[in-house]
Structures are given as structure tokens and as C-alpha cells.
Image: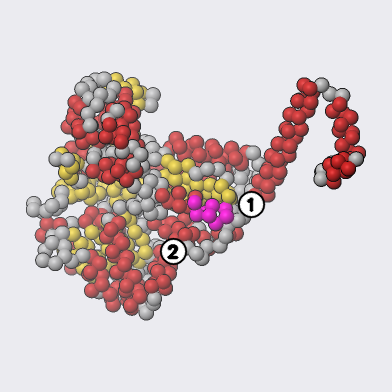
Amino acid sequence: MKDDNNLFNNSLIDEYTFKKINKIINNLSNNQMIWLSGYLFNIIENNKLNNELKKSSILINNKITILSSSQTGNARLVAKKLYDRMILSNFNVVLLKASEYKFKKINKEKILIIITSTYGEGEPPEETYVFYNFLMSKRVPKLNNLSFAIFGLGDSSYKFFNKSAKDFDYRLKELGAKRLIKRFDSDINYSKVANNWIKEVLNFFKNVTFNKSNLSIKNKSIKVDNYEKKYSKKNPLITNILCNQKITGRDSNKDIRHIEINLPNVNIFYEPGDILGIWYENDPSLIKKIILCFKLSNNDFVKIGNKNISLYEALLKYCEITVNTINIVKKYSYLSNNKYLLSINNDLLELKNFVKNTPLIDMFIVYKSKLLAQQLVSLCRPLSPRFYSISSSQKEYKNEIHITVKILKYRSKNFVHFGGASSYLGHRIDENDKIKIFLQKNNNFKLPKDSNIPIIMIAVGTGISPFRSFIQERENMKAKGKNWLFFGDQKFTEDFLYQIEWVNYFKNGLLNNINLAWSRDQKYKIYIQDKILENKNIFWKWINSGAYIYICGSITMSKSVEISILKIIQENGKMNKSDSVIFLNELKINHRYQKDVY
């Protein structure tokens, strides 16, 4: 009796109920008891699920915020696709660009979905910079009431693949937020992964009771620009080259081309700051080397998607053959069974160094192997378009688009290599040749809406491209705002891009100030940031008068320029380091500090 009392003292069931259960169990066979145990288990699991659904129901009885963090527009396209699908289901959802997001109120948010790209050295897109820094700072509050999902767009050939997406994911979790679904990381060919991610997101919401918005969508039409309906990355405009002209001097270390492209009477409209996407074809001489490496034939048939085409056509139009990646090296090590390549498979640092110093053709020649034609094309990444800043204003050139292209050339392991797209544009197409193009909007690099506002343009090399479109636009608008150009390169006589045009703009007063920096025209090097500091007092006056600052060129240059600008803010604005950073961030929030860097 003492043992029975102890049993009921520690039990969740009273003595009366226990006896009733025992009475039932004693009349059951072993199979019936097994069935009963399963039945009770299912009841428990269903109760757990119902509790989770109730929690989720509470969780999503709020609006869903979809945030696009985009550099070239791909993240925005994915965000818009998810938004459209959710609107069609009548969900309470809002779509915002990162630059529009009131991030200081993030602790009021319940559901946040972020679609972000990564560029440069693992940096977030320019429009997301201030939000990203806030989220990574000590000022951000705990986010225990937030649930989130992340989708990343990147390029696995870069060192910091999808770092922005990973940073957002880890930081939100660290701040107490809960993942709705796992993060998805996509490579350059992102469409299929994006579609799968969107299905996952929608499937999650199908399993919960959702508070739908009161908006009727019976007559709701999803707006799509006429341009996007007709011409896009998947359906480019086929047009022709009007001009392909070298604009660097004979003795320049660089081969830079000014290319004019015909824009026939079609429904395409672009603005200064926008980007042109170009589908290119690979170098036939490089294709020949690759095919010879594996003793294959041009006419070997391979399958690309649902198409059966020749190996030559596949390598010409569908495969990326100029960029090596860690994943390609790993795959090739198994296919080739090469001892050295297999030995570095698990050494990430060694793999990164190998990829950096060994283009695909070098790897194929030095580490020879036998591959079938299908294995070769499966090894390569799909060809992706290249993007260039537009260097013309449509107000000036109604039926043309201009770009400025540097031909990439470098030496590795005693082989000379050229950039895939740049050599195509510079060496393999000429006037009247056909070319496939599409427009990519860049809302992160735009002139101020008020044409009376002064602008400061800072560029090196081909970074001058968008500023040529800026100044043409301002001239055609008869803008009253002042214009200041800082430009730098190696040599004045060889590398002053569009020199005559800029001199004329300065002579006629449209360009109010011009400061030039030439790194190799004297014994000591002069850089663009040096010229900015030389003019610090006037620079500060322009900032105080409301000037917009634009930087275009290499990431390294932009970082050096930013350090100089922060020095000016600290010295002339009499601020300490942290206050100067806050001041600069305010300029970014107000779109008065914009960068287009690579």
C-alpha cells in the first residue's frame, strides 16, 4: 500500500482514473495495446501540431514585409515575384526596397522576408548599407518577436559567396528572431533556386491560418513595365553595333573602348545611372584549345537543358569558360582523379589560391585528363550576361545606347588570358555586327530629382561612364545645379577618357569644377583621394549646400575616397570619428551619397 501511495503521489493520474485505465487494458490483447499506444501517440503529435499552428496563427496575424536588397536588380525581381504570388493569394503583404525601409523600427516587425545580393568583397548592396550597419551594431534591439526568411543571390566564383545573406541570417538569429524556413543561397543561375524557395515560403503559409487583407483583388492587375514584357534577360533585344572605337592612347597600358549600340524604334527607355546587360559569345580560339585538351570533336553532341546541340555551340553560347571556381576544381578533381587536385580538396585556403591563379584552360592543360563531351559541359557553369554602366543620355541620343568597356587582359602560368565579355566587345564584334542586349534599372545611382541641386562626381578609369550620361542629361534639362568632376587614371595624355567632351563642358560653364589625378605622370603617385583633400574646404561647402556625392569605379578606390571624405567631415565639420560616420550615413539614407563600384 505504501508503494501505491508513492505511485499516485508522483503521478499525473489520480487513483480512480488509473484503475479505470487498468481495467480497460487488462481486457485488451497485445495487438490491441500496440494499436492503442500508436493511437495515443498520434493524439499527442496532433496536439503538438495544433499548438504550433496556433502559435503560427498568432505569428502571422500581421503584415508580411518583403525587403529587396538589390545591386543590379535581380534581388528585386525575385522579391517582386514572391510579392505577386502572395498578393494573388490576398495575403497582407508589403514590398519595399531596402533604401525605403524604416529599419530603426524593426523591433515592431513580426514577419520579415529579405532577398539580398552580395557584391564586391562580401558587401551588401549600396541601398542596404546603412540598414546592414545598423543591424550589425550594438544599437539594434532584441528581436524575439520577429520571424524571418532569407534568400541570397551570389556568384560562387567570388571569395565571399552570398555573404550578405549569411550575415543577415546569422545576425537576426543572434538577436532572437526565428527562422520561418532555412536560408536559400543561389548562384548566378538563380531562377530555379528562387522558384523553389518561393514555393517553400508559400507552402509554409499554407499550413497556417492567415489574416488576409481586406483588399479585393478581383480587378487587381499586377503592373509590369511594357519594356519587361518585351525585352528582358530571357528575351533580349537583338540589335547592331554602330561604333566600336578605342579611346585610350597608343602608349596606354589599357585598351578601353567606346561602343555605340543601335536602339531602333522600340519601347525601351533608360535613365542616367542605368545598366546595360549584354549576352556575349566565347572566344572561338579558346574553345578550340579546350576541345583539343580532351581530344573531343566540335560536332560531339551534348544536352543543354532540353536541347541537343554540338559541343562547339554549347561552349560558344551556353557555358562560362573563362572563370574558375572552387566547385569546378572539386568536380574536376574527381573526374580527373588527379592526385594534387584531390589533395587540396579539403584545404579551403589552398583551393581559393588555386582558383585565383588558375583559369579553367590552365587547369585543363596542366592537369590533363580524359572527359566526355557531356562531362565537360556539365563541369562548366552556365554563361551569364555581363553588365556595363550606360554612358549616354537618351535625351541626347534618342536611338542609341553607349557603354565604355575595358578589355581585360592578364597573364597566368605563361598563358595570356582575356575577359570573356570584354574581349568579345573589344575584339570580336565590329560595326553593324549583331548583339543581344537588355536594360537593367539601377535605382541606387540616380541624379537628384531637383535639377537645381549640385552634384560631385568621383571616378577612376571606366567609372567615368555614368557621369558622361549625367552631364549630358543635365545639359539637355538645362539644369541649374552645379557640377564638379574628380577623375583619375594613370597618364593624362593616354588615359583621359572623353577628354574633348569634358574640356568643352568646362569651357561652356556646365562643368563648374574639374580636378584630375594622374598616378604615373610624376615620380610620386597622385590619386583621386589626394585631390579631394586638396579641395577640402570647397568640398565641405558643397556638402553643406546640399550637394549629392557620386562615386564610380573600383572598390579599393571607393574605400580610399570614403576615408578622405570622412576626414573632411571630421575636420571641417568639427566632429569626432563616430559622429562623422553617422553624418555620412545620413547622407546615404537621404540618397546624397551613392556608389556604383566593382
Q: Residue at x 15, y 51 (%)?
A: 254
Q: Give how far across and how far down residue 515 sits, in percent.
A: 21, 68
Checking the image for residue 62, the label placed there is 1
Instruction: Determine whether 239 is above or below 257 in the image.
Output: above
Name the disc covering residue 213, or none: none
Disc with the residue nearer the chain's start (1 vs 2): 1
Task: Tell me where the magenta segment starts and ends, as one range.
Answer: 170-177
> For the residue marked with disc 2, what is the amino acid?
Ile
- The answer to whether residue 174 is magenta is yes
Compare residues 328 and 498 and report the one nearer the observer.
Answer: 328
The secondary structure type at the circle numbered 2 is helix
In the foreground, 23 or 1 = 1
Callout 1 secondary element: loop
Q: Is 306 inside the magenta-drawn segment?
A: no
How crowded pointer 1 is (Cα within 10 Å; few <14, some 14-19, many 20+) is rated as some
Percent of width and height locating residue 485: 25, 65
Residue that appears at 57% across and 55% down: 176
Q: Quadrant of residue 3?
A: top right
Residue 66 drawn above or below residue 478: above
Q: Quadrant of residue 240?
A: top left
Q: Amino acid at mark 1?
A: Asn
- Residue 200: horizontal and vertical position, in percent? 55, 38
- Taking the image as drawn, is residue 381 in sight? no
* x 23%, y 50%: residue: 404
Which residue carries the number 2 mark? 589
The answer to whether residue 32 is visible is yes
Do the numbered discs 1 and 2 sit on residues whose CB atoms are within 8 Å? Answer: no
The CA span between labels 1 and 2 is 27 Å
Quadrant of the frame with the N terminus = top right
Residue visible at 31% across and 38% down? 344
